Amino acid sequence: MDFIGRKVLVTAGAAGIGRAIANRFRDLGAEVMVTDINPAAVDAAKQDGFIAAVSDVSDEAQVRELMADVRNRLGGLDVLVNNAGIAGPTGPIETLDAEAWKTTFDVNIHGQFFCIKHALPLLRETQDASIVNLSSAAGRLGMAGRSPYSASKWAVIGLTKTLAIELGPEGIRANAICPGAVNGPRIDAVIEAKASMLGQPVEDVSDLYHKQSSLERLVEADDIANMAAFLASDLARSVNGQAMAVDGNTEKLY
Ligand code: NAD
């Protein structure tokens, strides 16, 4: 895979899985810009040599400004990675706060819609452009206590399949990635919230999370980065509208 001369934007690319994705594209020769809502994460990314901007994907005005910034600072766009997403609230559906439910959708699906809508003029100016949307194993399975997260990640797959049909004739591909539980601080917080909801020890719930994959271990952020690079590369030139599981084979989520 070779991304020399290609320009890549990774939302929420200053930390977590997004940062692993940004690193992978840069290692493969791309010029990479990252965004994050968190100014400290953006500063750290700048120090590591990335073009970086503070931007909240759930705010359409900020996304419009971001894409103008991409045009000025990156000089174009070949690959959009819609990575920004939040875990949302944990609890049985009847206990969930409506605002927290809506915020989960604002970031996880409306954010992708805004980024795609305002990136399209840039993507249309290049050849073989590609969109990679982060869904989740919870975007193809149910997940007790995480209904807004699961529902918003299913929406990502519907959006991706629709984009593939709408944009395919223009040569712009769209695919989604469905990671299983990824090793890192976010999954630790999710496991703690789930243990508290179930009234079970954190170690027991952590064990369930590890064993939900047939490989009986968590996925690494680099595994997701490898799939993102593959999907955006010429090796995947005929892969369009797919939701690629990177979860070690997961049939049930806890
Ligand atoms: P994370 O919680 O570690 O967050 C990464 C970054 O997102 C943070 O730096 C945060 O500041 C930023 N962010 C939050 N809200 C934002 C917004 N509105 N606009 C811009 N940036 C924002 O996330 P992660 O674990 O790296 O997950 C990345 C993506 O992968 C998400 O879409 C997530 O749903 C998905 N995913 C994660 C896992 C997992 O186990 N971690 C599993 C499946 C799918």
Image (cartoon, helix red, strand yellow):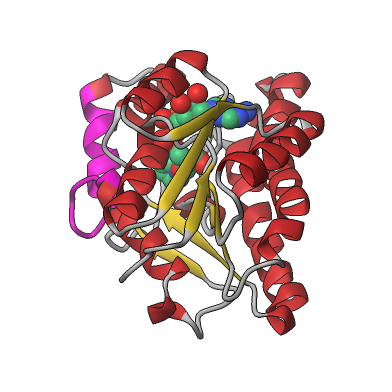
Any part of residue 254 in sight: no
Look at the image and say whether residue 79 sits in the magenta stretch.
no
Q: With 136 as the anchor, is 44 left or right in this view? A: left
Q: Is residue 123 above or below residue 38?
A: below
Q: Quadrant of the N terminus?
A: bottom left
Nearest to the observer: residue 180 or residue 211: 180
| x then y, percent, for residue 156 | 64, 54
Instruction: Please name the residue shown 60% across and 75% down the image.
Output: 127
Magenta part of the chain: 203-221
Q: Quadrant of the C terminus?
A: top left
Q: With 136 as the anchor, is 100 left or right in this view? A: right
| x then y, percent, for residue 51 | 47, 35
Instruction: Please name the residue shown 71% across and 32% down the image.
Output: 58
Q: With 210 as the anchor, is 237 left or right in this view? A: right
Nearest to the observer: residue 64 or residue 174: 64
| x then y, percent, for residue 171 | 65, 80
Which of the 4 image quarters holds residue 62? top right
Count of numbered tags: 0
Q: Is residue 28 above or below residue 110?
A: below
- Residue projecting furthest to the right: 61
Instruction: Please name the residue shown 74% across and 41% down the image.
Output: 110
| x then y, percent, for residue 236 | 43, 78
Nearest to the observer: residue 73 or residue 48: 73
Any part of residue 77 in sight: yes
Instruction: Please name the residue shown 37% across and 40% down the image.
Output: 17
Q: Is residue 87 above or below residue 157?
A: above
Look at the image and say whether residue 219 sits in the magenta stretch.
yes
